[in-house]
Amino acid sequence: MTVLIKNVLMLGLKRRDIYIEGNRIKKVGNVREKADFVIDGKDKAALPGLVNMHTHAAMTLFRGFADDMDFYEAWPKKVWPAEARLTGKDVYAGTKLACLEMIKTGTTCFNDMYFYPEYTARAVKEMGLRATVSEVYLDTKSLHVTPIEEKKTFRIIEKVKKAGGSRVIPALGPHAIYTVSKENLRRIKEYSDKKNLLMHFHLCETRKENEDCLKQHGKRPVEVLEEIGFLNSKLVAAHSVWLTKGEIGILAKHKVNVVHTPTSNMKLAVGGVMPYEEMRKAGVNVTLGTDGCASNNNLDMFESMKISALLQKHHLWNQTILPAREALETATTNAGKALKIDIGIIGEGMLADIILADLKTPALTPNHNLISNLVYSTNGSCVDTVICDGKILMQDRKIKGEEKILKEAEKTAEKVMAKTPSGGGH
Ligand SMILES: [Zn+2]
């Protein structure tokens, strides 16, 4: 199939035609070719589909379930027991809802870590999005050391591949330094090298994590990870909040990708702020993510871009830190680089993951500075059209099967929460 977007406003404030052939962008400029499908771009701005680099997609089921509670009251007593009851079908229903929300807010690709990843993969495939999908790996529920079983891991990856098709890339999801032994982290890294798989990890989210690591290993988390050879460019480290200058240097040296998760960090009151400016200066590739819906509570990457920029400015008493252009880069180009996929840029030869913002909305008027408007003024509701892998997933904000997805997710959430002793999230 071919798609032609005519006369659309680009981020550089010039109007262009975008010609898509199959799943790639064939031409950007003045296009004379005829296309199977033509979109009038007159009142629209085109930008690369946004990439959410840290999700637990099915946690949409937990939206509003454990808010304004102490973490050690909410998570062990409400969230984790409910998670333990989840079935693959529940994960599927929750992920469908997540995908629906992502399409509606302009996200075309996400980096997920959760249970029953083959069900996540199936939902992604059906919804037409792109994702890297990993199973969350914890040593055991009681955190005893059990060697990672290669055969089991291999089976899961094969299942994810089969369920997800060409737009889903399987990855490895070692949870964190406090839930996976050094020995198993080393094994997972070896497996990642052997099969060329990305690793999705939680790093230095809380001060407690660092203190416990110092007590247990006599070193800081990044130092421990370097010592066991865990760090490289295939590692995507979410949060990365509580880091020393020395640790930032180590992350830069090994080309580790980090994910800024400002909304989740503030909601969970982790106290620290990801040292964005120091990371940028050191050359660390910084991307952006929402985290799961129990700690955000939405998947709107426009909102996260704004919050990321505001938090960094506020933190350093400096209005010039993390400007809108860089915020947009964390959600696009930097993510493409981290995932090693041809996304995040509207350019010839790139995969055709493109979103169109409706310029005829109050928040995008007047248009003195398009990127500023996109980051600081609007939110995901400005997205009018979503194209992923050359296919139109949404036009005029309408998505096929939307009501059914909402209904299924509602039903599933009720079922999962019904057994919570405190009577659910109400
Ligand atoms: Zn997380």
Image (tube, rainbow, N blue to C red):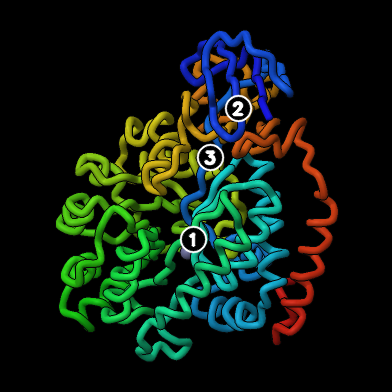
Residue at 66% in and 33% down: 383
Place of residue 26 in the rendered image (x, y in percent of width and height, measured from the top left): 53, 23
Q: Which residue is mark 3?
A: 50
Front one among 81 and 366: 81
Q: Is residue 147 above or below residue 256?
A: below
Q: In whole angstroms, how far apart are the C-alphas of marks 3 and 1?
A: 20 Å
The quarter of the displayed image where residue 143 is located: bottom left
Label 2: how many Cα within 10 Å (few below 14, some 14–19, many 20+): some
Residue 170: which disc? Answer: 1
Residue at 72% in and 71% down: 89
Do residues under tags 3 and 2 come within 8 Å of each other at their CB atoms? no
| Element at label 3 | strand
Residue type at the position of mark 1? Pro
Residue 379 seen by the camera = no
Comes first in the chain, label 3 or label 2: 2
Q: Which residue is mark 2?
A: 21
Front one among 347 and 317: 347
